[in-house]
Amino acid sequence: MIGVFDSGFGGLTVLRALVTRLPRYDYFYLGDSARAPYGSRSLQDVHGFTREAVELLFEVGCPLVLLACNTASAQALRTLQQRHLPAHRPDRRILGVVRPSAEALAGLPPGAIPGVTEPSLTSGTVGVLGTAGTIASGSYALELAKLAPRLRLVQQACPLWVPLVEAGETRGPGVDFFLRKYLDPLFARPDPPSRLLLGCTHYPLLWSGIRAIVPAAVEILAQGELVAERLADWLARHPEMERRLSRQAKRRYATTDDPSWFAARGEPIMGTALAVERVRLPLWRAAD
Ligand code: DGL
């Protein structure tokens, strides 16, 4: 199976695109809803929680895990790839969403080699919206500096958006107030972004409100399709991993919190009824 991890149910916006673009593979989705949101947590917590989640996905039989969570990708991916995998799981792979999203933001096609393929956007301003943890990590700035050094990046943390989405509040005047709180300053700048990335997997669930506020000329990128497209390209370039993936079009869903709550939030996103399992991560197992 391909393991897909998010702090909660927001990563289902990525899974939906994955099963559309790559339907034959089997997927195991894990949402750590009991400990979400991650966006306001310390780097140590995000790293520890993500490592536990990834280990669970390895244990249930995923050779490949995608961190469909910007906060986890920004704060934990590099250490997991560089330290955890070589020491404990040299045969497994973990991918994240920051690098592919930065490529899309700069207008690099999937599989492009930076330095060889010129990004379609080399100057001007682009924007990233994300959790406080994602923005504070500086990961998008780092990646973009490598891909398109002359592109100016403006970033905005939107700490109140994930709690709104997790509470099921995705549209209406109350929601618009909090959308404007972070969007208005971005577009009041003298150099507003011409392309804006929703750098949090929960934010596509606020799409209609965001689209109505952001000037029509601004291109808004959500991560589902772009991540799916780039994963397809990655698998084509890594046949040794692609061969290890099972293909019965099975999907499993697990949460660390109430499965019926998770299913109620997830079903509108996936467009189908979900059978959700409850799993306990090691932190709780010790206390049980
Ligand atoms: N959905 C996650 C992301 O993409 C984070 C949400 C949270 O737990 O704060 O960053």
Image: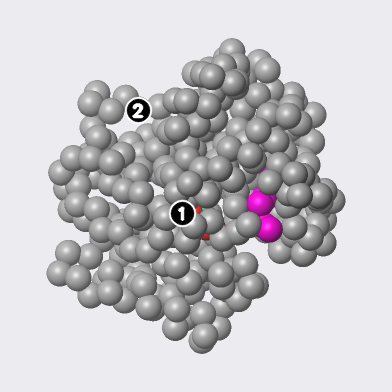
- Residue farthest along the bottom direction in this orientation: 173
Q: Position of residue 48 (x, y in %)?
A: 56, 43
Q: Is residue 93 magenta?
A: no
Q: Which residue is mark 2?
A: 112
Residue at image x 33%, y 36%? 108
| Circle 1 SS class | loop
* Residue numbers of the magenta segment: 29-34
- Residue 103: mark: none
Distance Cα–Cα, label 2 vs label 1:
34 Å
Say above or below: 70 vs 118.
below
Do we see residue 99 in this rendering?
Answer: yes
> Badge 1: few (under 14), some or many (20 or more) residues near its Cα, within 10 Å?
few
Q: Residue 198: image x %, image y %?
A: 43, 57
Image position of 287 (left or right of 54): right
> Could you tell me the amino acid type at mark 1?
Ser
Residue that numbered label 1 is attached to: 42
Q: In which image quadrant can residue 251 be found? A: top right
Q: Please name the residue shown 59% across and 21% down the image.
A: 88
Measuring from the top left, give residue 149's x and y in whole percent. Answer: 18, 40
